[in-house]
Amino acid sequence: MNRTFRLLIAFCLLALPAVSEMPPSLPVREAFNSPGRNAKPWTIWYWMHGCVSKEGVKADLEAMKAVGLEGAYLMPIRGVRTPSVYEPAIEQLTPAWWAMVRYTMEEAARLDLKLGMHLSDGFALAGGPWITPALSMQQVVWTKTLVKGGRSGRFFLPQPTTREGYYKDIAVFAYPAPRDMMLPDDSTAMLLVEAQPLPIRVTSADGQQDLSAKTLTYRSDSATWIQYEYAQPFLCRSVVTRVNGTNLQSHRLRVEASHDGVHFRTVAQLEPPRHGWQNTGFDVTHAIPPTRARFFRFHWTPEGTLPGAEDYDNAKWSPRLRLTGLHLSAEPLIHQFEGKNASVWRLAHPVTEGAKSTANWVPQDQLINLTDKLQADGSLRWTPPKGQWVLLRMGHTSTGMTNA
């Protein structure tokens, strides 16, 4: 495996002169009228599912030369299918595959074409069977536990999301809980969809009511609404919309609130962030104006959907609502932070004015580092000062992204 990796790196290094070659400076007009080779276009050259042959390589390269291309970036993608769609298929990184790469380089040289290697076997950056989960791309993950202060206790902090069987702790912090943040069992909501009860009743910390645990997907092709009814008025500062797959419509909900379940007022219109195509299945956090009410209703309609675009990729699909979770919280959160901290490929909307208020900030001198108290079983013993505290357990795990 190490020899294969070295060969791949060597190939990429050999390709560098092709992309760094620049002629001496020329007057702009002369360079425009008679552009040099450095101005010629390149192309991405996919080898898919191991469907490659010498005849095909020769024909492709000759076609590139004929239309005036300067070179190509070789991009093998996706392994051999079962059953194979081409015979004989060549599995990537096998001796036969490397022989084909060598032949390709020779043909490119014969035709005076440049050849580069895309730094991946697919779209997930460099990878291969020698990359263990610990060495793979990583993502920061965390869990929050709300506790009452004023007395000593042993607290169990759930391990954050773990992928590929790999997780490593980074740190544990404690900070004062925001006002009105609910403790477990303080908030129970009844869920309705267009006045029909859902077969589900959820109670969890901080009013975090889940429509499902990503096992149920609510779907609708026509205008609909989902309602949360609380026994006591509930303060909502943020809403997380959860999907399982590609769905822009779940982030277009109109949020309404009511004290009596009859007369509703509009609180916010959720807007999807601009995004690329690697946006599938990730949550979107929406900060809304702090609202206290017994009833929260989320309206959806397919009308008004913007057309798909380069930075609005999910809008190209049919306007259908597919929702796996709504997460209502009294905790003030940064609006669409998933794009701001690069958790996912998005252009997030600016931070709302309410979130900028210092009342929502945790003073640095009140942030307590409890990392050295965390035990192997996820527990820690600590005596919190009086009040309510959030225990934040942070770590990192594999993104779970594999080469295409």
Image: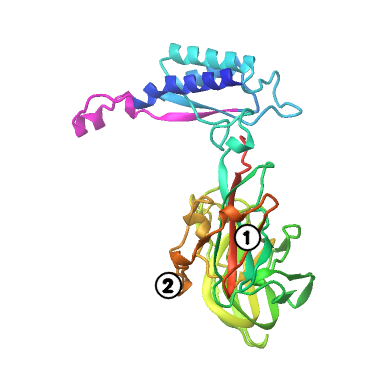
Seen in the image, is 212 located left or right of residue 142? right
List x then y, in percent, for residue 80: 69, 27
Q: Quadrant of residue 401?
A: top right
Residue type pointed to by label 2? Thr
Q: Residue at x 61, y 72 (%)?
A: 149
Span colored in magenta? 21-47
Q: Secondary structure at mark 2?
A: helix
Pair 2/1: label in front: 2
Q: Secondary structure at mark 1?
A: loop
User: In front: 24, or 364?
Assistant: 364
Seen in the image, is 32 located left or right of residue 176? left
Is 29 one of the magenta-colored residues?
Answer: yes
Q: Which residue was labeled with disc 1?
A: 319
User: In front: 167, or 372?
Assistant: 372
Q: Quadrant of residue 350?
A: bottom left
Q: Which residue was labeled with disc 2?
A: 358
| Mark nearer the N terminus (2 vs 1) | 1
Looking at this view, name the residue that lies furthest to the right. 199
Seen in the picture, residue 4 relative to 242 is either above or below; the reply is above
Seen in the image, is 311 located left or right of residue 298? left
